[in-house]
Amino acid sequence: MSPRGRRPGGEDTRALILAAARAEFAARGYARASIRGIARTAEVDPRLVHHYFGGKSQLFAAVMDVPVDPSTIVGEVVGGDVDEIGERIVRAFLTIWDSPANQPALVGLIRSGLGDEEMVGQFREFLVKDMVGKIIQAHPGARALPPRERQFRAGLIVAQMIGLALARYVLRVPGLADAPIDAVVARIGPIIQAHLDRA
Amino acid sequence: MSPRGRRPGGEDTRALILAAARAEFAARGYARASIRGIARTAEVDPRLVHHYFGGKSQLFAAVMDVPVDPSTIVGEVVGGDVDEIGERIVRAFLTIWDSPANQPALVGLIRSGLGDEEMVGQFREFLVKDMVGKIIQAHPGARALPPRERQFRAGLIVAQMIGLALARYVLRVPGLADAPIDAVVARIGPIIQAHLDRA
């Protein structure tokens, strides 16, 4: 299976791929890193990378130690009524962040990530391309916007969601940190929806 | 002028007060720190602290090396038509952050501040009490909300504004980082306004 005759052995191979991915994301940034290049660095077959991690976004999440699968979330969010996509985004986001299994890793990631210029670049590309970009592609109104306006809307969505994460989980602003998910969804869902809708 | 017979001498006194304020904010947090306590630590008369810095929020800005005066901003924002307060908040915020004289200090502050638990607490109290809290007090609709709802709205405003700062100036998300102030005001102004309005 390996192009150079290595015999991949479970955990070792997984760790090897992760190390190669970390190096590749750091050296080339998220957008320009490729499964093929990561496989080459790890000296394994690209199919093995897909086998262990799925696609690039899952590999990024694994490198970042985030215990959630970005493509599953995006899939859940974009399925269903397009007029409620804003609410689904906010609900999915808060459900993941509220979970005690995820929150410490995510808070650690956002804190260290923002302090490190290299990670900032990787973050930006990941959020814009793989998270918000895919949601915009799934929304007929947003998809039909001129490219510059589409980029602007993506930026507004990133701003709202990252600000929500910071205020609720890092700054822990009273009143927001302890608000029920439904209350936050009711106020932020329509904001995200408005950023996606054509007008 | 000094209670212990010191003769305050310009820059030295200013530096002495700043050092005392830094220690006091760190030890007690923004909300519980007082001009009186800071003056005591610096061994100067509290009136001297007011003379050099104005109030607590200006002293905090000076400690944080932020070259803007929070109370002037709040004053400008709350003056004028209450139905356009959202737009004024966003415009004042972006004007300050866009300025090359302020941006490096503000970006540095947000980056280092979020990585440090003690600074996070000071930030939160400063934003919630002195910035957003004063704006809410100046808006008849927001002021009339029940206390819990008022806190929630303050949290939503903090979330939107800190997310805007991060996405535009730290992550530098394309489409948002390079959008004209007017375009951002047109989209985010009404969001802030809606968080303040009674409904």
Image (cartoon, coloured by chain):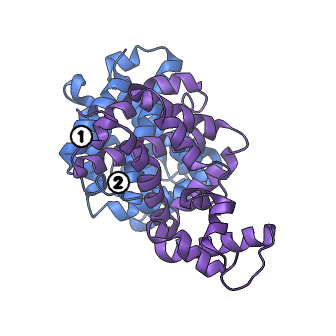
Chain colours: A purple, B blue
Crowding near the residue tagged with mark 2, few <14, some 14–19, many ≥20 C-alpha atoms within 10 Å = many
Residue pictured at 61% horizontal, 61% vertical: A59
The outermost residue toward the bottom is A4
In front: B58, or A118?
Answer: A118
For this rendering, which residue is in front, B93 or A105? A105
Given the image, on which type of amino acid does mark 2 rest? Arg
Q: Position of residue A24 (x, y in %)?
A: 55, 75
**Residue A59 visible (yes or no):** yes
**Figure quadrant of the C terminus of chain A:** top left
**Residue A152: image location, x then y, percent:** 28, 48
Nearest to the observer: residue A9 or residue A158: A9
- The image shows residue B34 at horizontal and vertical percentages of 54, 42
The foreground one among B196 and A152 is A152
SS assignment at label 1: helix
Residue B88 seen anywhere in this rendered image of the structure:
no
Q: Amino acid at mark 1?
A: Val
Residue at mark 1: B185
State the mark number for residue A113.
none
Indicate left or right for B160 with A22 as reference.
Answer: left
Q: Chain of mark 2?
A: B
The answer for how far apart the CA atoms under marks 1 and 2 are is 13 Å
Mark 1 surroundings within 10 Å by alpha-carbon count, few (fewer than 14), some (14 through 19), many (20 or more): many
- Residue pictured at 35% horizontal, 54% vertical: B168
Residue furthest front as drawn: A1
State the quadrant of the N terminus of chain A: bottom right
SS label for mark 2? helix
Q: Quadrant of residue A142?
A: top left
Chain letter for mark 1? B
Which residue carries the number 2 mark?
A: B168
For residue A193, which quarter of the picture?
Answer: top left
User: Which residue is located at x 69 percent, y 78 percent?
Assistant: A2
Q: Is residue B98 above or below residue A165?
A: below
